Amino acid sequence: MSKRPSKPIHILQLYPRDMNIYGDTGNLLVLQRRLERYGYEPVVHSYNPGDAFPDDIDIILGGGGQDSGQNKIQDDLIAISPRLHDLADGDTPMLVICGLYQLFGHFFETHDGTRIKGIDLLDVTTYGRSERLIGNIHTHSRLFGDIVGYENHSGQTFLGTSATPLAEVILGAGNNVEDTHEGAMYRHVIGSYLHGSLLPKNPAIADYLIHHAVKKKYGEEIEKQLNDSLADQARAVAIKRPR
Ligand code: GLN
């Protein structure tokens, strides 16, 4: 019997050593499993400072981190910035959470005044404040419906005119305490403050990343409708949780 030809989808995990907190690895696991169920072969590349940047990338994932972790990776991130811009402008889907969301913007000025440079991919700017924004968060997005997760950040992020908010906050803080926006989008790049992990409870976002990756690489639509009743139940419980 001949084996079905495998259709690889390459996922690049950015800085898993320094930027990966509050379960962000769960986002990778969800993409791997869903890709398999849709009939694709997930191939994971872990990229840490100094590594060779792979040639073939279909989805990029990045997590959150302490200010010290952000400091550690900033020079390397600036070095690979042209590659990330090329991929983003070529409509490669990306999901970056919290610490890397901040550094996909212009800069993060920490609460002690240290400025950590970003790569200007998202039109957002972040200022650290003494108050940390911590707790469960519930938002609503036009594209994805309800989105739930957990946030813990000192940085407050403000959108410039060319960034679109990912969602509007229903419970919690999101980007900052002054407006109601959460996250930002540019082309198929999503930045968000939501850990938790995000994708297990919000599979619509996982499918958005997979849909765009598969369409770009193979010109195909994802076919099978997965049963997400467990994720739906988890989301329903998470929405009822107090802050
Ligand atoms: N260090 C950043 C902040 O405190 C990001 C935190 C995070 O990724 N959870 O704002």
Image: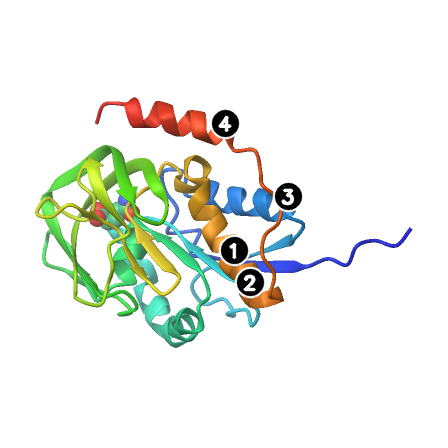
**x and y percentages locating residue 100 in the rendered image:** 32, 56
Compared across the picture, whether 243 is left or right of 141 comes to left
Give me the C-alpha separation between circle 2 and circle 4. 27 Å
Give me the C-alpha separation between circle 1 and circle 3. 13 Å
Q: Are marks 2 and 1 in contact (CB under 8 Å)?
A: yes
Give me the C-alpha separation between circle 2 and circle 1. 6 Å
Sooner in the amino-acid sequence: mark 3 or mark 2: 3
Give me the C-alpha separation between circle 3 and circle 2. 16 Å
Q: Residue furthest right?
A: 1
> Residue drawn 36% across and 54% down?
96
Q: Are marks 2 and 4 in contact (CB under 8 Å)?
A: no
Mark 2 is surrounded, within 10 Å at the Cα level, by few (under 14), some (14 to 19) or many (20 or more) other residues, namely few
For disc 1, the marked residue is 211
Q: Are marks 1 and 3 in contact (CB under 8 Å)?
A: no
Residue 86 against residue 115 in the figure, above or below: below
1 vs 3, front mark: 1
Q: Nearer the viewer, residue 183 or 61?
A: 183
Mark 4 is surrounded, within 10 Å at the Cα level, by few (under 14), some (14 to 19) or many (20 or more) other residues, namely few
For disc 2, the marked residue is 215
Sooner in the amino-acid sequence: mark 3 or mark 4: 3
Give me the C-alpha separation between circle 3 and circle 4. 16 Å
For disc 3, the marked residue is 37
Give amino acid for label 4.
Leu
